[in-house]
Image (cartoon, rainbow, N blue to C red):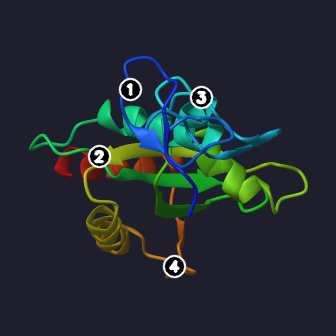
């Protein structure tokens, strides 16, 4: 075991075994950086605002903007997307994030990047809303669905999604 030394950071009276830098674990980050371990105060350290942490903060702030009917946080969106090659057919589903993130998920596999968003609705429970959405679609659509693809007009798809958005 190493000897104990007093932490050199201001307003800290703790002892530490870190004899090289003389900073206790409460006063420095300790995460790997380009030159060994980060020796900054955890409150001011760049690791506290790493891209992963920023991503988590952005998701929570985006979702908190859309509060549910009873004050709960929205869990995601139910959506309808279409592809020009499959005219008349629209895919319905659920996803955590809206807009570009949703479209990029499908356009990754499409060489022409041709999927477009018909409509999306924020909901408090993605799973329940999608289940209700599929039931509504089966009542309205006469052609049997092909998985999550339904033969329906864009106008009717928007109306059904709006109805589900109000309910959830």
Residue in the picture at 21% in, 44% down: 166
Q: Is residue 106 above or below residue 122?
A: below
Along the line of sight, which residue is nearer the eye, 55 or 42?
Answer: 42
Label 4 vs label 2, nearer the camera: 2
Distance between the alpha carbons at the discs numbered 1 and 2:
43 Å
Look at the numbered discs 3 and 1 and tell me whether their residues touch, using CB distance below 8 Å: no
Label 4 belongs to which residue? 145
| 24 relative to 161 in the view: left or right | right
Label 3: which secondary element: loop
Residue in the picture at 62% in, 59% down: 88
Pinpoint residue 116: horizontal percent, then vertical percent.
67, 45
- Residue 12's label in the rendered image is 1
Ranked by sequence position, the earlier of labels 4 and 1 is 1
Label 3 belongs to which residue? 40
Distance between the alpha carbons at the discs numbered 4 and 2:
28 Å
Pinpoint residue 85: horizontal percent, then vertical percent.
79, 59
Look at the numbered discs 1 and 2 and tell me whether their residues touch, using CB distance below 8 Å: no
Residue in the picture at 30% in, 67% down: 136
Label 4 vs label 3, nearer the camera: 3
Label 4 vs label 1, nearer the camera: 1
């Amino acid at each position: 075991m190493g000897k104990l030394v007093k932490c050199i950071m201001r307003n800290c009276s703790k002892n530490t075994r870190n004899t090289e830098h003389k900073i206790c674990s409460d006063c420095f980050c300790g995460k790997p950086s380009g030159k060994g371990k980060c020796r900054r105060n955890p409150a001011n350290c760049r690791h506290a605002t790493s891209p992963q942490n920023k991503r988590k903060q952005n998701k929570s702030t985006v979702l908190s903007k859309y509060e549910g009917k009873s004050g709960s946080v929205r869990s995601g969106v139910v959506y309808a997307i279409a592809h020009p090659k499959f005219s008349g057919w629209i895919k319905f589903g659920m996803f955590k994030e809206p807009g570009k993130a949703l479209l990029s998920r499908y356009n990754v596999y499409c060489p022409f990047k041709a999927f477009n968003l018909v409509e999306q609705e924020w909901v408090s429970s993605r799973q329940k809303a999608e289940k209700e959405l599929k039931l509504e679609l089966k009542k309205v659509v006469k052609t049997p669905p092909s998985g999550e693809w339904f033969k329906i007009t864009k106008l009717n798809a928007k109306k059904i999604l709006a109805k589900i958005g109000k309910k959830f």
